[in-house]
Image (spheres, grey):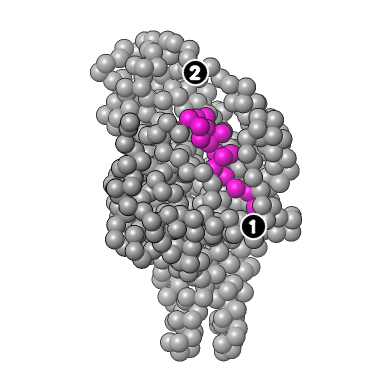
């Protein structure tokens, strides 16, 4: 489940402003079996379970700060650990009771030792204050980021040297990368000094959009689903990249994607142009992937769906403000050739962030919730996030470069941990994974790149041999 305080301006107070109505088929205070609860999994009748309490979130669905899809994905299911991961304790204790309409009758969901241990570790982090940061931590972070931007302006306006202008382009790309890390932390509520500190998140999100050019509201809508079901072939938007990339043979069968609400076609373009050669396309596409993020932001901000329409005017103003100042900056570069070089070089450098993001998951196991293998992948929140994450092993002096993304396993299991505390808490989750034989994986930045390349290459080789008839024969019974 996503954070309760959103960049769209909907705070947790909305929980109590309009208590949900109950579904037609249930009476408040009832007792229900897991089988009965499982049937209530549509937008018109949506239940979820938290700590054996039945919650009716049907009325809340269109107002959910984290978007509709994260709630729909767990309709009729137990979402206890998802709620724990993304909400403060005071939210769970004070707000969720307004949604309770009954309790679970049967106790089939026995909590495993693994889940108990991970929950206890999360409680330890809470007691230690690791879900919050020093009030000065992000003051220095943001100051450092804007120092980079100041250098860009100095080199553009203070010199006529082509070399200086290209250096400015490189620094602008680094500025975008580093500011994106700040936006990422704010979106996860991990950039706060205490539990009820909202740090004006809607306006900070708009500020990040203004300087970075990518809608934070769009990012939250996709990223929340990614965290809930990472590397799910039919749900996770962060691996749904056809016709350009396919990470597993499952994707060759044109699966219906629940997030995009459409079939991701393995069409002629995918079959003949991109996927068979995707390992060669990977870095060139990462260098220009930022343009696709602009497009996705525009499409999202112009739509009114997924619970994120409340700040449309502010987000749109911030988004178009970005292109206004960027166009003015590029216009100050002398000569069209130099302007074009400045524009594309800055975007290519910012493409490092796209590489960093995809390194964390592209080479990890892919699963399909519609198949039996889902249970082997990891049915609980913690297992599936450990298995689907790859950490980057690096010395502390490179932490600024990775922006916290190098501790992907820890971040996915406890997304509210402040970046300030990630390095010192990583050994705890490594130890817990070892205790429960979970495949915690950490490799160097170069090794991670090689592994992603090999994953793309292996799938590309399969794509060259692929035939729909082969797939049908593989799925045939008997």
| Secondary structure found at label 2 | loop
Residue 312 visible in the current orientation: no
The disc placed on residue 109 is: 2
Q: Name, please, the residue furthest toward the front.
A: 478
Q: In this image, 126 relative to 42: left or right? A: right
Between the C-alphas of marks 2 and 1, the distance is: 39 Å
In the rendered image, residue 65, in percent from the top left (x then y), is placed at: 41, 40
Q: Residue at x 55, y 64 (%)?
A: 352
Does residue 308 show up magenta in the picture? no
What is the chief secondary structure element of the magenta stretch? helix
Does residue 379 show up magenta in the picture? yes
Per the image, the residue denoted by label 1 is: 447
Residue 115 visible in the current orientation: yes
Location of residue 427 by image quarter: top right
Q: Nearer the viewer, residue 357 or 97?
A: 357
Q: Residue at x 55, y 70 (%)?
A: 349
Q: Quadrant of the C terminus?
A: top left
**Label 2: how many Cα within 10 Å (few below 14, some 14–19, many 20+):** few
Magenta segment boundaries in residue numbering = 374-392
């Amino acid at each position: 489940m996503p954070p309760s305080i959103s960049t769209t301006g909907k705070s947790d107070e909305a929980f109590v402003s309009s208590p949900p109505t109950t579904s037609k088929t249930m009476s408040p205070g009832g007792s229900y079996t897991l089988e009965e609860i499982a049937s209530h999994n549509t937008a018109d009748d949506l239940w979820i379970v938290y700590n054996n309490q039945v919650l009716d979130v049907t009325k809340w669905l269109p107002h959910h700060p984290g978007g509709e899809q994260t709630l729909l994905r767990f309709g009729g299911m137990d979402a206890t650990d998802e709620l724990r991961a993304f909400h403060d304790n005071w939210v769970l204790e004070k707000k969720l009771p307004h949604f309770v309409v009954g309790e679970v009758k049967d106790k089939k969901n026995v909590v495993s030792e693994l889940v108990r241990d991970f929950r206890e570790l999360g409680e330890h982090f809470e007691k230690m204050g690791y879900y919050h940061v020093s009030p000065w931590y992000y003051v220095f972070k943001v100051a450092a980021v804007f120092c980079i931007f100041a250098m860009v302006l100095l080199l553009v306006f203070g010199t006529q040297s082509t070399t200086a202008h290209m250096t400015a382009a490189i620094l602008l790309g680094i500025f975008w990368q580093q500011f994106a890390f700040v936006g990422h932390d704010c979106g996860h509520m991990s950039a706060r000094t205490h539990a009820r500190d909202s740090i004006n998140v809607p306006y900070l999100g708009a500020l990040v959009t203004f300087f970075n050019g990518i809608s934070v509201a769009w990012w939250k809508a996709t990223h929340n689903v990614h965290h809930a079901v990472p590397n799910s072939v039919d749900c996770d938007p962060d691996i749904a990249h056809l016709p350009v990339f396919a990470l597993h043979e499952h994707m060759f069968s044109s699966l219906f994607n629940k997030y995009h609400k459409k079939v991701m076609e393995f069409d002629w373009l995918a079959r003949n142009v991109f996927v068979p050669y995707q390992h060669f396309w990977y870095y060139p596409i990462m260098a220009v992937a930022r343009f696709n993020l602009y497009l996705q932001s525009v499409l999202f901000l112009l739509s009114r769906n997924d619970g994120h329409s409340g700040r449309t005017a502010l987000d749109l103003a911030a988004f178009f403000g970005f292109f206004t100042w960027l166009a003015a900056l590029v216009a100050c570069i002398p000569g069209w050739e130099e302007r074009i070089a400045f524009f594309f070089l800055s975007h290519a450098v910012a493409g490092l962030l796209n590489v960093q993001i995809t390194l964390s998951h592209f080479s990890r196991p892919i699963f399909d919730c519609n198949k039996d293998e889902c249970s082997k992948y990891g049915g609980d929140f913690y297992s599936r996030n450990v298995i689907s994450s790859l950490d980057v092993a690096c010395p502390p002096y490179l932490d600024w470069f990775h922006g916290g993304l190098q501790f992907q396993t820890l971040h996915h299991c406890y997304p509210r941990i402040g970046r300030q505390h990630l390095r010192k808490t990583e050994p705890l989750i490594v130890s817990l994974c070892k205790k429960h034989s979970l495949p915690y994986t950490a490799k160097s930045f170069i090794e991670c790149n090689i592994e992603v390349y090999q994953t793309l290459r292996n799938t590309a080789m399969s794509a060259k041999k692929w035939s729909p008839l082969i797939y049908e024969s593989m799925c045939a019974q008997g």
